[in-house]
Image: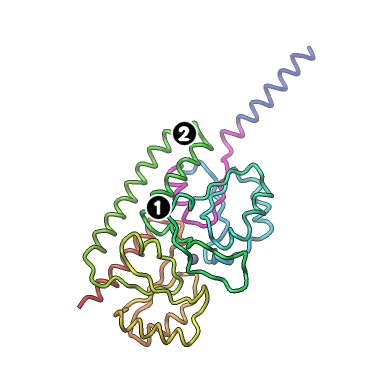
Amino acid sequence: MRKSLFILTLLFLYSCNQRSIHSGRQTITVTIAPYSFFIREIAGDDFRINIMVPSGSNPHIYEPYPRQIAGLRESAAYITNGFLGVEMSWMDRFKEINRTMKIVSVGEKIEPIASAHVHEDESDHDEAVDPHYWISPKCAIIIARSVMDLVGELNPGKRDNYEENYEDLVQKINDIDRKAKTLFAGLKERSFMIYHPNLAYLARDYGLVEIPVEFEGKEPPPSRLRELIDIAERENINTIFVQKEFDTRNAKTIADEVGAEIKVIDPLSEEWLDSTEDIINGLYLSLSGNEK
Ligand SMILES: [Zn+2]
């Protein structure tokens, strides 16, 4: 009698456990919002997504709240970009909070570009590698693969389904890659100016030249600002790109001086496809408008 009660209890516990696996979604934490796009495209709503750096914040210097760090205990996995200041400073602590959390660093499979960011007094924030690869469609294909492998591993029952969605996503990224190649191929002017230099990978992958306004990861000193005005005139710069999270004052000073416009971009958007397309279109309009 006692034995059968024990078996019943075991069965009950087992079924509870199964139920929580099937109905409760696992959580994946991502450092920045664009990675939620890749998870949703491949796995729909199968995972709860926790974004470490909220919209409007700067991932190079972000300090997470204690409740965000504590919240990592519920994460089955963490997708790091790799080389972002917040990760350089906090990843070890994140790993301590949750030792079983699976960690995927998408940057590991991407050919790196040495960083333009040097933070003068915070050595643990130093980013040896430029971390902005997610904005290039060529890099995004590699990122999609890493995300697909992760969600397939976390939820193996739906791996076939995820592979199909991944193929669809690769098609979409290939379309935007082809579009970028076609648009940029015939340009004579290839240099663009941007406040915070987040388009180095896009520039490398499509043969453009990025001219940053930021100087060593901070506002340019007046002497550099004057230099930039000369460069802008020489390179026929008609647009200065500014990321939503950054102050436009310095960019505006140069723009006013040379008669250029400010174009605000949103590379940290959760809608990766829309924001990347907007950046590519913006670059094309700016560079093609330069042609005489
Ligand atoms: Zn950045």
- On the rendered image, what quadrant is the N terminus found in? top right
Q: Splitting the image into 4 quarters, where does residue 42 fall? A: top left
* Residue labelled with disc 1: 140
Residue located farthest toward the left when viewing the structure as drawn = 292
The residue sitting at 49% across, 61% down in the picture is 129
Image mark for residue 158: 2
Task: Name the spot of residue 61 as percent of width and height, x first.
Answer: 58, 67
Magenta span includes 67:
no
Element under label 2? helix
Give whichever of 269, 148 is nearer the camera: 148
The residue sitting at 48% across, 37% down in the picture is 152
- On the rendered image, what quadrant is the C terminus found in? bottom left
Which amino acid is tagged 1?
A: Ala
| Image position of 150 (left or right of 11) | left
Task: Name the spot of residue 88 as percent of width and height, x first.
Answer: 59, 59
Give whichever of 75, 83 is nearer the camera: 83
Task: Name the spot of residue 86 as percent of width and height, x first.
Answer: 59, 61
Element under label 1? helix
What stretch of residues is rendered in magenta? 19-42
Residue located farthest toward the right when viewing the structure as drawn = 2
Which amino acid is tagged 2?
A: Lys
Classed neighbour count for the residue bearing mark 2: other residues with Cα under 10 Å, few (<14), some (14–19), many (≥20): some
